[in-house]
Amino acid sequence: MASSSVRREHYHHGDLHNALVAAAVALARDGGPQAVVLREVARQVGVSATSAYRHFANHLDLLAAVKAYAQQALTAAMRAEPVPDHVDETALGDQGLVRLHALGRGYLRFAETEPGWFRAAFDQHTPTAAGSESFRLLSEALDELVRSGRMSAARRPGAELSVWVTVHGLAEFLLDGGPLSTLGEVERENAITRTQRFITDALIG
């Protein structure tokens, strides 16, 4: 009883919103966006649904908060993906391209290791913020290819969308239930490498 009173008092001082988001994020991690139900989130936190509705107008409002969290986690995974020190020129090209492909590998790794959050990051029932950080990382990598002279300026307009769609499509195919989800480790790596080469050819010819 004492711990419950302390917890509710803590929420009374303004932390309930964050507690609800944290519970929703945990549900999404295990079961994707469809697992995020406002009443269940309230139950897990230990408050009434009425209390939860004071912080989120509806289910989609809460899901939008989860989506924002998942988008941030995706961006962090892309940033954290290591860039090889030694580059196989015949496979991927120069360091700028390797950096671009590292972002893509981080994207794919996030989809593989956090499928629930990955699906939440692109949930179709809530709007995606314009100019997301992950999209900006991709745009900056492409801009650097143009500045270095590796990519023609004529190929730059709209390139980020084409690259994003290609990598995202591969991620969806590799996820559980996708047509490539049963590939072994070697086959999966080959699929990623072929996709990277396809992107390289499309960008620099």
Image: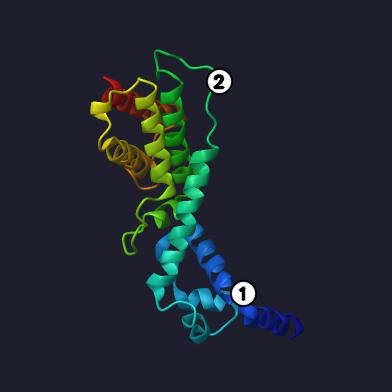
Q: Is residue 119 above or below residue 205?
A: below
Mark 2: amino acid: Asp
Tell me if residue 9 comes above or below residue 126 in the rendering.
below
Secondary structure at badge 2 equals loop
Q: Position of residue 94 (x, y in %)?
A: 43, 18
> Could you tell me residue 42's position as x and y percent?
53, 78
Specify the quadrant of the image occupied by residue 166.
top left
Mark 1: which amino acid?
A: Asp
Locate residue 79 relative to residue 145 in the image: left or right.
Answer: right
Tell me the residue at 41%/57% (across/down).
120
In percent of width and height, residue 175 lies at: 39, 45
- Residue, disc 1: 15
Image side of residue 35 versus residue 163, left or right: right
Left or right of residue 111, residue 7 in this image: right
Crowding at label 1, few (<14), some or many (≥20) Cα neighbours within 10 Å?
Answer: few
Q: Residue furthest left?
A: 154
SS at badge 1: helix
Q: Is residue 35 among what the camera can see?
A: no
Numbered circle sitting on residue 85: 2
In the picture, residue 7 is in which quadrant? bottom right
